Image: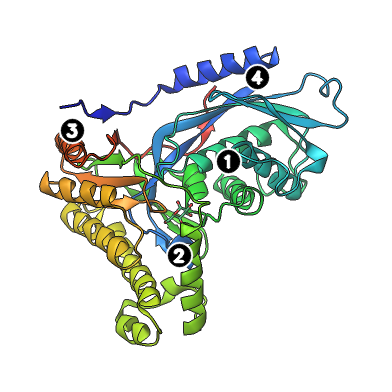
């Protein structure tokens, strides 16, 4: 039998130091700072952000680090001010002219970085010639928002090196108003520049989550409420290492189905429909696909409220049950689960987990498992064995605590 694969978190100091050194080697001078932003795992409230509902993510301890420095003099030989970005994952330094940024002008992973600079410039930031070095340690393609970690770490790094617009509403990056505005720029960058139709939960979590809390985010107003994490709850994240991508069209397809249903029902947001009106609402829809997506959104909204109310009082049994229900809803009604994810959830239940569900956009990626104290390791091992029996890829296992939002690492 193969060994379970536990994914460790790089200590912050080490991550900062490695990124600083890599920056210095690449650009020949020291960076002015290293910023970092976390991945996120959504405890519950899936596909609700773009439906105007509430979601309950936590920030992961896994970070993307971004070292930043102004170019010593404007880059020699460049016709106009440039940004340059290099990555620990290899490939050449990507260069782009700040004056010529437009959707599609930079492609691949660097489009997320360029997109943030573009969105911040659009918001009135004066961005100088700049150098960036990224070292991402959030599992990629796992539904844990490595892209939001990239955009949010870029936003803080760029903010530090740039001149804020005159009407910018804040003075410190620790101010929630500042973080909300920078998250909005990151959302624009992903939607309009990189072409990823994400709904805003991921960037908000990476920018605004709080250690020791789950973040209840109302996606109609983007107001947050930090919900105390019960000390006795253990959380396991399981990356199935099966496919997940936001730009392959399936995520967009679900969004479109939701929009179609909202239009047919004449409502601005599906999440605003009351649970008491569920059956009457479904009866007004023409087919099983639209009924499924609407049933998911309405029942998931109710589950988020239940979990947010139950967590602070330590009612973990009820919260766990809501997680299992959420998984069934995504499998049967929203139809975004996979055999790998279904198996993880079944094995988690068998091993005694309080609750488990797939998390993130779906069609692969990760599951989140709520465990009684002292049981996460055993449950992780059981899930590993289950995957092995099925000839599924060996999952990446992470035992996590709700961690802090983006911050300065060094
Ligand atoms: C992805 C998107 C988010 C959200 C989730 C589903 O992670 O980026 O905005 O829609 O899927 O809850």
Residue at left offset 52%, top offset 41%: 147
Which x, y percent locates residue 156? 61, 36
Q: Which residue position holds label 1?
A: 151
Q: Read off the residue under disc 3.
A: 377
First in sequence, mark 4 or 2: give its number. Answer: 4
Task: Identify the image quadrant of the C terminus.
Answer: top right
Does 395 sit above or below residue 254? Answer: above
Which mark lies nearer to you, 3 or 4? 3
Which marked residue is nearer to the observer: mark 4 or mark 1? 1
Residue 219: x and y, percent?
A: 48, 61
Mark positioned earlier in the residue sequence (3 or 4): 4
Q: Is residue 198 left or right of residue 290?
A: right
Q: Position of residue 246 (x, y in %)?
A: 49, 51
Q: For this rendering, which residue is in front, 206 or 196?
A: 196
**Secondary structure state at the residue bearing disc 4:** loop
Q: Are marks 4 and 2 in contact (CB under 8 Å)?
A: no
Dot 2 falls on a residue whose secondary structure is helix
In the image shown, does 266 or 251 lie closer to the viewer?
A: 251
Instruction: Give whichever of discs 4 and 1 has the lower sequence position.
Output: 4
Cα–Cα gap, marks 3 and 4: 39 Å
Give the alpha-carbon distance from disc 2 to disc 1, as whole Å.
24 Å
Q: CA distance from mark 4 to mark 2?
A: 42 Å
Dot label at residue 31: 4
Residue placed furthest toward the front: 391
Q: Nearer the viewer, mark 4 or mark 2?
A: 2
Ligand 1 lies under 8 Å from the Cβ of mark 3: no
Left or right relative to 170: residue 206: left
Residue under the image location 60 percent in, 54 percent down: 191
Does residue 398 appear anywhere in the picture?
A: no
Nearer the N terminus, badge 3 or badge 1? 1
Residue under label 2, please give it: 254
């Amino acid at each position: 039998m193969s060994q379970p694969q536990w994914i460790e978190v790089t200590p912050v100091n080490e991550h900062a130091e490695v990124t600083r050194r890599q920056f210095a080697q690449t650009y020949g001078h020291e960076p002015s700072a290293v910023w970092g932003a976390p991945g996120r795992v959504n405890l519950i409230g899936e596909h609700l952000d773009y439906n105007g509902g509430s979601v309950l993510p936590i920030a992961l301890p896994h970070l993307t680090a971004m070292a930043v420095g102004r170019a010593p003099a404007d880059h020699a030989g460049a016709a106009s001010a440039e940004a340059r970005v290099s990555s620990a994952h290899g490939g050449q330094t990507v260069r782009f002219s700040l004056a010529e940024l437009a959707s599609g002008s930079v492609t691949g992973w660097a489009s997320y970085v360029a997109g943030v600079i573009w969105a911040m410039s659009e918001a009135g930031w004066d961005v100088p010639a700049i150098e960036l070095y990224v070292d991402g340690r959030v599992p990629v393609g796992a539904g844990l928002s490595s892209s939001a970690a990239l955009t949010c770490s870029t936003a803080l790094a760029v903010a530090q090196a740039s001149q804020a617009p005159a009407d910018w509403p804040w003075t410190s990056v620790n101010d929630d108003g500042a973080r909300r505005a920078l998250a909005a720029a990151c959302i624009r960058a992903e939607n309009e520049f990189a072409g990823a139709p994400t709904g805003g939960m991921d960037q908000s979590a990476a920018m605004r989550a709080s250690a020791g809390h789950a973040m209840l985010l109302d996606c109609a107003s983007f107001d947050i409420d930090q919900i105390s994490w019960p000390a006795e709850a253990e959380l396991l994240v399981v990356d199935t290492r099966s496919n997940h991508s936001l730009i392959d069209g399936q995520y967009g397809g679900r969004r479109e189905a939701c929009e179609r249903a909202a239009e047919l029902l004449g409502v601005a947001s599906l999440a605003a429909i009351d649970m008491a009106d569920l059956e009457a609402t479904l009866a007004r829809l023409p087919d099983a696909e639209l009924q499924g997506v609407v049933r998911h959104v309405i029942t998931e909204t109710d589950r988020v409220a239940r979990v947010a109310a139950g967590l602070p009082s330590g009612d973990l049994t009820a919260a766990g049950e809501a997680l299992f229900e959420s998984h069934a809803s995504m499998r049967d009604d929203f139809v975004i689960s996979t055999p790998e994810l279904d198996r993880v959830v079944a094995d988690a239940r068998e091993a005694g987990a309080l609750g488990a569900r797939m998390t993130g956009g779906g069609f692969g990626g990760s599951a989140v498992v709520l465990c009684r104290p002292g049981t996460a390791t055993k449950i992780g091992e059981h899930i590993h064995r289950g995957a092995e029996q099925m000839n599924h890829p060996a999952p990446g296992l992470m035992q996590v605590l709700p961690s802090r939002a983006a911050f300065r690492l060094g």
